[in-house]
Amino acid sequence: MTEPVLVREAGPVLVVTLNRPAVRNAIDLRMAEALSRAMDELDARDDLRAGVITGAGGHFSAGMDLRAFARGERPVVPGKGFAGIVARPPDTPLVAAIEGYALAGGFEIALCADVLVAARDARFGLPEVRRGLIASGGALMRLPRRIPHHAAMELILTGATVDAAWAHRYGLVTRLVEPGTALDAALALATEIAGNGPLALRASKQIVRRSADWPQDEQFAHQREWSEPVATSADAREGARAFAEKRAPEWTGT
C-alpha cells in the first residue's frame, strides 16, 4: 500500500509530502497518523532545523476525506486534532508549499505553517458553510489573525474559493511563484531559515505564538522566559564570534 505521507531529508530540512494524489490528498485517519509522526520527527531531531509541507500530484489538499468520514472514520489524532497537526503544530519552523487546491481542512493544515509559498494558480477556500458545517480545524481562530478581519470573514462566511493572488495581496502568502515551482521555492526558503540559530528559531516562534495571550504589562517579562536562555547560550556566543571573524556560525543547539 502506498504510504500516505512521504518524508525525506534535504540537509537540515525535513520535506513532508501528503501523498494521496488520486483524491487530491484528502485526509483520512491513516494520513493523519502519518503526518503526526512526521511532525514528531521534525521536532525530536536536533539535526532538523526547518520543515516543508506540500502535496503530491499537483494539489496541496482538498481537506477531509468525506468518503472515509461517511464510513465513520474521523482523521483526528488525540492531542493533535484534525490531520494530526491543527491543534498542535510543530515547534520547529514550517513552510507550506502550495500547488493546486488548499481547501477546507487542507487550508487549515496550511495555516499551521509559519510561512506560505504558493503557485500563482493555487486556490484557497473554506467551503464548510456551504455544506452546513464550520471550519473547526483552526481556520476560524487563525485566519482572522493572519489577514484583515473583514477579508477573513468574507472568506469564512461565503465559503468562496480565492486565488493565490488574493492570498498574496493580504499577506497570507509571502512568496508567489510560477506553477510547478512552489516546492523548490519553499525548500530554498526553509534552507535559509535552517541556517540560523536553532535555539533562536524555536524561541522566536514560541514568543510569536504565545504573546497574543500575554497581558500587555507582562509581555516583556514573559518574553524574557524564552529570550534569556537563548541570550546566555553557547550558540549566542558562537554567533557573535562568527560575526566578528566573518565566517559562518557552527551551531550546536546549546
Image (spheres, grey):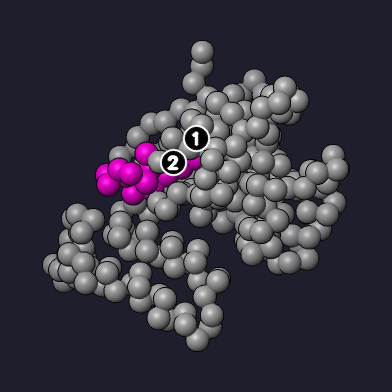
Where is residue 202 drawn, in percent x and y?
Answer: 37, 59
For the point 43% across and 35% down, the residue is 37
Which quarter of the figure has residue 220? bottom left
Residue 209 is tagged as none
Per the rendered image, the range of residues in magenta is: 41-53
Q: State the image coordinates of residue 250 (x, y, percent, origin top left).
A: 18, 55
Residue 44 magenta: yes
Whole-Å distance between the Cαs marked 1 and 2? Answer: 6 Å
Q: Tell whether 61 sits left or right of 243.
A: right
Q: Position of residue 158 (x, y in %)?
A: 85, 51
Toward the viewer: 223 or 5? 223
Give amino acid for label 2: Met
The residue most toward the top is 1
203 drawn magenta: no
**Residue at (17, 69) in percent of width and height:** 237
Which residue is at the front of the view, 50 or 228?
A: 228
Residue under numbered circle 1: 35
Q: Which residue is mark 2?
A: 39
Q: Do the residues under discs 1 and 2 have CB atoms within 8 angstroms?
A: yes
Left-right relation of 136 to 160: left
Outermost residue toward the bottom?
217
Q: Give x and y (percent) for residue 207.
A: 44, 68
Quarter assignment of residue 169: bottom right
Secondary structure of the residue carrying tag 2 is helix
161 sits to left or right of 238: right
